[in-house]
Amino acid sequence: MALYLEASKILKKVFDKTTSVKTSVFASQYQNKKQLFALVQETLKYNTILAQIVNNSKLLQREKSLQNDLVLAEVLVYDFLIGKGLKTAAKLKQAILRHKTEILAHCERLKVKAKVNTVRDLLPDAVKNKGDLPRYARINYLKSSSQQVREKLDSGGWKFVEGDHKDHQNFLKTISNLKEAEYTSDHDLRDLLVFPAGTDLHDDPLVQSGQLILQDKASCFPAHVLGAAAGSHIIDSCAAPGNKTSHVCSLIRNDGKIHAFDRDRKRLQMMERLLRTTGSTCVRAVCRDFLTVKPSHPDYRDVEYILVDPSCSGSGMANRMDHIVDSETAMSGDRLKSLARFQISILKHALRFPSVRRVVYSTCSVHATENEEVVEEVYEQVSDKFDLVSAMPAWPERGLPQYEHASKFCRLSVESALTNGFFVACFQRKEQYNYQNDQRTEPDEAHNCVNSGFQKKKRKLKDEPRLPGIGHIPAGEKITEVKSKKQKQSRGGYGNTNHSENPNIDKSVKIKVIQETVFSEKKSCEFSGPRKPVSVFGKTVSHDSEPNKINSSRIKKRKRKKNHKPIV
């Protein structure tokens, strides 16, 4: 019963346009989110047909236990007619079975009227064909190789199809004509395999062991466009559920450091499970909003590559049915503008990291508001430091032509690529621009990453002032901290201190440090050096004399005799 009630609750929110299917399912307390997502999606897909059956059969008027809840009735009728059947929720199941004759009769009338044989044939072509994409699976180089995967597939009864991969259109024909138990390699990405539409590989041993990762071709583009070198420092700013993060790990063979941020703890836990399955050991997953990460922090100021795949409308996802309830007016209004503002803030923040060389921006949206307009606006502000470079230059589909840098952008769609709708853009730092003028940094030469965390290495900044006996004094450090350090060192003395050798030191700090040094030296030398001899009880004693030269017992004895009074 909980499944049907939760599905109807989510659908009501979607119909009210207050949330998306994906967001609501992940926020749900229902444990089996895969099952819940499928039920919501399919009910939304057949929504119009189900509503006709419920209304024509007068189900809500005849069955009072449904409490006039049309959405709940649609969910139940879907599972009864099209889904796996009502196997749970005894009370709700009986509510449908009591009227199954009327439900089935009205379903048959619709099919006869439309002259079709199945309920699926009642769907409009735009809805029916949406989602019928090939099954893509990425080879995980951390656990296997292309040759090993092909050998295991061939031994399992699969047949590899060579096909004509000379150009993009011939490749689309090849994958469109794949038959059951056939597969081929991708024309554009060397680590991707293509299977016929509808192929279920979730229980395949290669997938269960992490050698194959089920991932759409479109979402594989960002990692390839990023082109991170082995041993580099990388950030995935919106990482969960982790497919792109694990893909980068595969391409660099776990040789590097990857900081994966996401502010949703549940999604981050899903990513951590995926990383364990794929053997991605060079990732440090952090439950944190990327916007709160300081680019100048020692852990991140050496980052060279950043993936920015922020939250978006998801309008390019072929298997999502949000478009059914989203009108053009609604999708071009406040919701898209709000998303675009967030996406701009994330992208601008990524470009502030001092050592970043390349930033890849991507969305699974088809709207220019979230794609070309975001990139063009940000580029205007950073064009003195970064260039827009062509993402996947050989890819035929580029950005929308009305935008200035359309040729630099990469778009994918169901119609032209047999993938989900996607957008990719790439920022690259100009070679002549040197961030060293703005902020002092020195790259960390250690690029080793272990399961328990990163190996930290102390860095010395050459251009920071240095005082003997103290070490580096960063510019702007409080003088109280300098004093406390110097007071500790003053006990042992400073030796020769020449502050003129440090021209970069702040003048105010320099003066106070010198004054404190003189004071400390005077204090430490207060009782040292030659002094005038003094008389102790009539005997001349020099300070240079050693203490054991003075017979203290004789002095005490003379003192007693002097003060002694005879008895009368």
Image: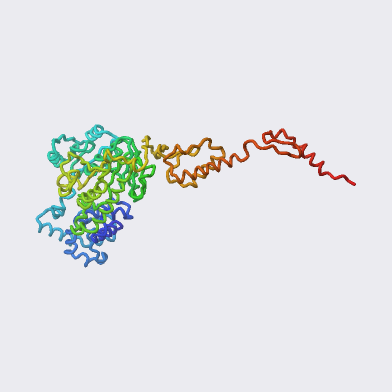
Nearest the eye: 197 or 94: 197
On the rendered structure, is 491 left or right of 508? right
In the rendered image, which quarter is residue 149 located in? top left
Nearest the eye: 481 or 211: 481
Residue 277 visible in this rendered orientation of the protein: no
Q: Is residue 33 above or below residue 188?
A: below
Tell me the residue at 14%/52% (across/down).
Answer: 126
Nearest the eye: 229 or 519: 519
In the rendered image, which quarter is residue 558 located in? top right
Residue 249 visible in this rendered orientation of the protein: yes
Q: Residue 244, position in %: x, y?
A: 28, 43
Q: Is residue 85 above or below residue 493?
A: below
Q: Residue 186, position in %: x, y?
A: 19, 38
Q: Residue 317, position in %: x, y?
A: 21, 49
The residue at the far front in this view is: 532
Where's the N terminus, which quadrant?
A: bottom left
